[in-house]
Image: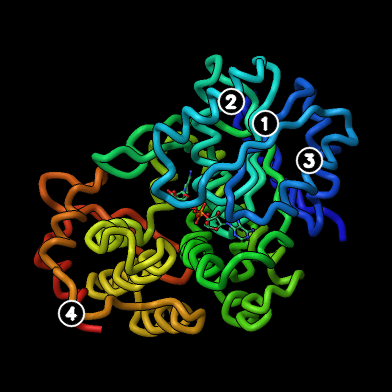
Amino acid sequence: MSEKIIKVNLKEKSYNIFIKENILSSSGNYINQLNIGKKILLVTQNKVPSIWVQKVKESLTKKGFKTFVLVLQSGEENKDLSTLLKITNFAIKNKFERSDSFCAVGGGVISDLTGFAASIYYRGINFICIPTTLLGMVDAAIGGKTSINIKEGKNLLGTFYQPRIVIIDPRTLKTLSKRELLVGMGEVIKYALLEKTAKTRFSKNNFFKFLKSKRKKILKLNTKELLQIIYYSAFVKAQVVSKDEKESNLRAILNLGHTFAHGIEQVFNYKKYTHGEAVSIGLCLASKLAFKENLISKQMLDSVIELISDYGLPSKLEQPFNLNKIIKSMLLDKKNKDGKFRFILPIDKIGKVKIVSDILVKDVKPLFQSF
Ligand SMILES: NC(=O)c1ccc[n+]([C@@H]2O[C@H](COP(=O)([O-])OP(=O)(O)OC[C@H]3O[C@@H](n4cnc5c(N)ncnc54)[C@H](O)[C@@H]3O)[C@@H](O)[C@H]2O)c1
């Protein structure tokens, strides 16, 4: 099967995303074309099956690269300063130079950490990204946001630092748990709800309808459909990032459902709901608000909720929950102004969104009660 290529267009920082079944076995060929130093540090995690890293390592070795593997502990709690320093210390000890590279092989945690380390090591070393979770493939690996968590909050320290290349092998998803796969599905559904505003070439087709009609095949990890949803989603993200790298305007639409999701995740200490589950509830709440504000029809609201439920994702919060705490946490969102919410909301028809300001707390609270 031929590869799919998406270009992220950022002038001298432009790069390609290559998507192909079993591409890991030839990843060395793609990386070799970057004209970079021959030393590569592969950064991965203990829960990422070692076969994936081995495939990359073997392919790089065939092309004459000298590879090093650093295995970190899995888990969001390890996206911290001490783990970041493990990467940079390893590189210093092994005399990595500026023309050499750090390569993330894993999910969003490993790409955020490795990208951050690459951006500060000798003021910037090449960064290569090989995502192995669906969330990584459709979101975290694309767009150059890197970060670590500190005790004051998630993703508070970070940089914008674009990778030189992103290599996506859908085969790696075969070892991912269903729950982790669904984390990514939450984001995939989000792209279907905003792709027309991103003005992608799918606008004429319908990504939403595709997700609806091919659900069984997607959940069975059928290669053809999986490749398509990764391609569609990564394409939408790449288009948005190419137009607005540092979130001055358009990139904000990618936060659809996320103000709700962050509030929910924080109040439940990132335990009860995965990010994808919280995003799914957030997408339903945003659609509900859009309906209340006469931006979308009841029929459209129902189809969003139905699609999310069909994928086995939650459309509402389970009782009991502390609504005041969730609202308080949501009010900390950087997009808000003067104690009023600023949301990205769906409008008109599926695929279109806009930023809506001046939403009051009293308009938001009832959304959580009545589904
Ligand atoms: N930079 C961005 O733009 C951006 C966007 C979205 C999310 N993120 C970040 O991404 C992180 C979440 O990413 P995630 O959902 O990929 O979680 P993750 O990186 O923690 O991966 C989930 C789990 O799956 C394991 N794993 C990875 N690949 C596997 C595979 N192929 N088979 C089996 N297990 C595998 C990991 O070791 C981990 O235990 C968060 O820290 C979030 O802040 C960043």
Residue drawn 70% across and 47% down?
6
Locate residue 270: give its quadrant.
bottom left
Label 1 packing within 10 angstroms: few (<14), some (14-19), many (20+) = many
Residue drawn 36% across and 78% down?
315
Q: Position of residue 164 (x, y in %)?
A: 67, 32
Q: Position of residue 88 (x, y in %)?
A: 53, 24
Q: Earlier in the sequence, mark 1 or mark 3?
A: 1
**Side of 198 where 51 appears, left or right:** right
Toward the viewer: 368 or 169?
A: 169
Which amino acid type is marked by label 3?
Answer: Lys
- Mark 3 and mark 4: span between their CA atoms? 52 Å
Instruction: Report if the beta carbon of the residue with label 2 is closer than 8 angstroms to ligand 1.
Output: no
Which amino acid type is marked by label 1?
Answer: Leu
Q: What element carries label 2?
A: helix
Q: Which of marks 4 and 1 is nearer the N terminus?
A: 1
Q: Which of marks 3 and 4 is nearer the N terminus?
A: 3
Residue drawn 52% across and 48% down?
140
Instruction: Report if the beta carbon of the residue with label 1 is closer than 8 angstroms to ligand 1.
Output: no
Instruction: Report if the beta carbon of the residue with label 3 is closer than 8 angstroms to ligand 1.
Output: no
Q: Residue 57 carries which label?
A: 3
Q: Is residue 236 visible?
A: no
* Residue 199 drawn above or below residue 81: below
Q: Which residue is denoted by mark 4 in the rendering?
A: 369
Label 4 packing within 10 angstroms: few (<14), some (14-19), many (20+) = few
| Mark 2 in CB contact with mark 1 (< 8 angstroms) | yes
- Mark 1 and mark 3: span between their CA atoms? 10 Å
- Mark 3 and mark 2: span between their CA atoms? 18 Å
Q: Which residue is denoted by mark 1 in the rendering?
A: 41
Which amino acid type is marked by label 2?
Answer: Phe
Label 2 packing within 10 angstroms: few (<14), some (14-19), many (20+) = some
